[in-house]
Amino acid sequence: MTVPFATSARSSVGLEWELMLADGKTGDLAPRAPEVIEALADSTAHERFTVTGELLTNTLEVTSGVGSTVAAAVDDIADAIAAVRTVTDPMGLELLCAGSHPFAQWFEQGVTDKTRYHKLIERTQWWGRNMMIWGVHVHVGVDDVDKVLPIVNALATYLPHLQALSASSPFWAGESTGYASNRALVFQQLPTAGLPWPLQNWAEYESYLDDMAATGVMADATEVRWDVRPAPRWGTVEVRACDGMSTLPELAAVTALVQVLVEHFSRELDAGRELPILQPWFVRENKWRAARYGMDARLIVDRAGTQVPVAEHLRETLDRLADVAVELKCARELAGVDAILSGGASYARQLTVAEAAGGDLREVVQHLIREFRNGPTLREHLLTLAR
């Protein structure tokens, strides 16, 4: 098949954030997304943001318009959340976000009544029903289709960094998993999910799609669920490796890192330089290490097998990309990465709360609800950085 790659503004940004609906008193998941979406339909029809459903009826997905800056995209997300709360607050529902819900059970969750979701569950069975996962998708515009696969391959070397920063799923169905991001390993069980195949150019990508369609694995490019993938319809590269971020400033920080990485790689290609990649077996090992150890992971950072703590390599990366961030007007948002490095990612905070509560995971859910509702807005967070 011939797959056109849409025109998009270089390094423009779009966001998709999957949010849980929970009962405000019990903290358990609430299957009321269809009601919320219907109640919002008229009032949000002409907004830049959207509020839609996902696989499970306990989930809302809020999406931004196309932003020229990270701040613009995050502002859309903040507006979407404010609109959602006009409906959920009177219903006694709370919003929260993490890669997994600490104690909910898969067999108690309802599937959204759409053909594509029913087909997915029919094919994937137990694994599909276990997809109680929430994530963030970051789109960044690419100005030339010939850059797309090289950028995807280069970004694969940074997926463990992004996964560690966003890791927020240490609990699963009431159990402590020992992983910072259990979501990362659950999600890759789906067909076409997981790490991208190391394709070299757009023609190879089209050939891959032909093979998968001809054998009935999928219908089109929208069913490619790689951790980082081309998004032909939007003219973007889409990073899907991140657990659901627990606060808006953390969402902004990770988005800024993705944006500056894509722009940096684009400039390297403009200069005629090859982008650095790792052996696929190193990429796979790094993903596992980030899922298991989060911010304590030691990553393989070059083809010679050099191993460096993820926090150290992230700080080196931030220094190297500082000028790009200034030009893209996301330097303050990117500074939020250092805040995560200093203060810990969501999985670490959840584990601390669980320990203090004697293992009561209901307290972890209330912690996530409080963080999402009462944590600093992006504007408040940026003001603290400026002081």
Image (cartoon, helix red, strand yellow):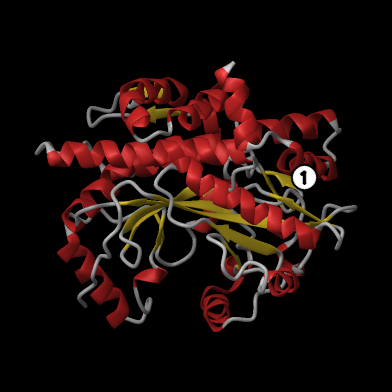
Residue 350 occupies quadrant: top right
Relative to 67, is 89 on the left or the right?
A: right
The N terminus lies in quadrant: bottom left
Height in image: 343 above or below 93?
A: above
Q: What residue type is labelled 1?
A: Ile
Height in image: 44 above or below 78?
A: below
Q: State the residue at coordinates (38%, 41%).
A: 259
Residue 386 occupies quadrant: top right
Residue highlighted by disc 1 = 369
Of helix, strand and loop, which one carries label 1? helix
Residue 92 rendering spot, x and y as whole percentages: 87, 58
- Judged from this view, the residue extending furthest toward the right is 25
Q: How crowded is mark 1: few (under 14 residues within 10 Å), some or many (20 or more)?
A: many
Does any portion of residue 272 appear in the rendered image? yes
Height in image: 37 above or below 276?
A: below
| Total numbered badges shown on the rendered structure | 1
- Judged from this view, the residue extending furthest toward the left is 272
The C terminus lies in quadrant: top right
